[in-house]
Image (tube, rainbow, N blue to C red):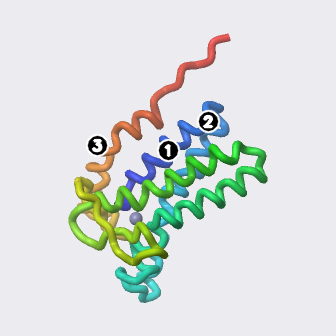
């Protein structure tokens, strides 16, 4: 990707995290950020970082090892905020891991993901690749970008539905 598929994962994770509407909204926002954060590496293009570099696009930030560190960070933050630390860390780790894994399922260009960085620089692809790759940056609003978004609306339908399905009102 990255397009709105990562958002679908973040929103669904937030919904699963808490049934309290206020906490759920915050969790949806937080896990969406966790889901998107690996693509901040695209900023490197502005500074001449090569796609294939360790810090290039789909490099270090897309690593499962780094996702574990993100989970650890979530643990510390949750503990300070009086939230269930282990649950928060587990959710954050899985959401962060989902990004790199989903990117390996894309086709249409780019490189695979450095899932094992810093242990290995190898760029991995999934055996099954069915998500069209999204253009980077402002190009996401091109015709191709909008096509990818539409595809991700369909591919991630279970996540969208789970995240937005109306809840039963508590009966009193
Ligand atoms: Zn990515």
For image coordinates 59% across by 52% down, the residue present is 30
| 3D distance between C-alphas at marks 2 and 3 | 25 Å
Q: Is residue 84 above or below residue 68?
A: above
How many numbered callouts? 3
Q: Secondary structure at mark 2?
A: loop
The circle drawn on residue 152 is: none
> How far is mark 2 from mark 1, CA to CA?
11 Å
Q: Where does label 3 land, which residue?
A: 154
Of labels 2 and 1, earlier in sequence is: 1
| Mark 2, residue position | 18
Give the left or right position of residue 91, taking residue 100 as reference: right
Decide which of 165, 34 is in the foreground and name it.
Answer: 34
Percent of width and height locating residue 41: 47, 74
- Check contact, mark 2 vs mark 1: CB within 8 A: no
Q: Which residue is the extreme one toward the top? A: 172
Q: Earlier in the sequence, mark 2 or mark 3?
A: 2
- Give the percent coordinates (x, y) of residue 58: 39, 71
The quarter of the picture showing ligand 1: bottom left
Q: Which of the two residues, 93 or 8, is positioned nearer the viewer here?
A: 93
| Residue position marked by numbered label 1 in the rendering | 11
Spot occupied by residue 13 in the image (x, y as percentages of width and height)? 51, 43
Q: Secondary structure at mark 3?
A: helix
Nearest the viewer among 31 and 89 is 89
Residue 161 location in percent, x, y? 40, 34
| 172 lies left or right of 163 | right
């Amino acid at each position: 990707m990255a397009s709105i598929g990562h958002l679908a994962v973040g929103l669904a994770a937030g919904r699963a995290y808490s049934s309290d509407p206020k906490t759920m909204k915050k969790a949806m926002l937080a896990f969406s950020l966790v889901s998107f954060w690996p693509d901040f590496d695209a900023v490197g293009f502005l500074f001449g970082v090569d796609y294939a570099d360790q810090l290039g696009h789909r490099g270090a930030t897309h690593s499962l090892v780094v996702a574990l560190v993100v989970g650890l960070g979530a643990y510390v933050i949750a503990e300070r905020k009086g939230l269930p630390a282990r649950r928060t860390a587990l959710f954050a780790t899985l959401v962060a891991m989902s990004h790199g894994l989903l990117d390996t399922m894309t086709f249409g260009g780019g490189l695979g993901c450095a899932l094992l960085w810093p242990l290995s620089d190898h760029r991995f692809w999934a055996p099954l690749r069915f998500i069209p790759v999204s253009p980077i940056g402002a190009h996401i609003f091109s015709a191709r970008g909008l096509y990818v978004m539409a595809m991700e609306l369909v591919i991630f339908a279970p996540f969208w539905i789970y995240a937005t399905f109306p809840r039963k009102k508590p009966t009193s």
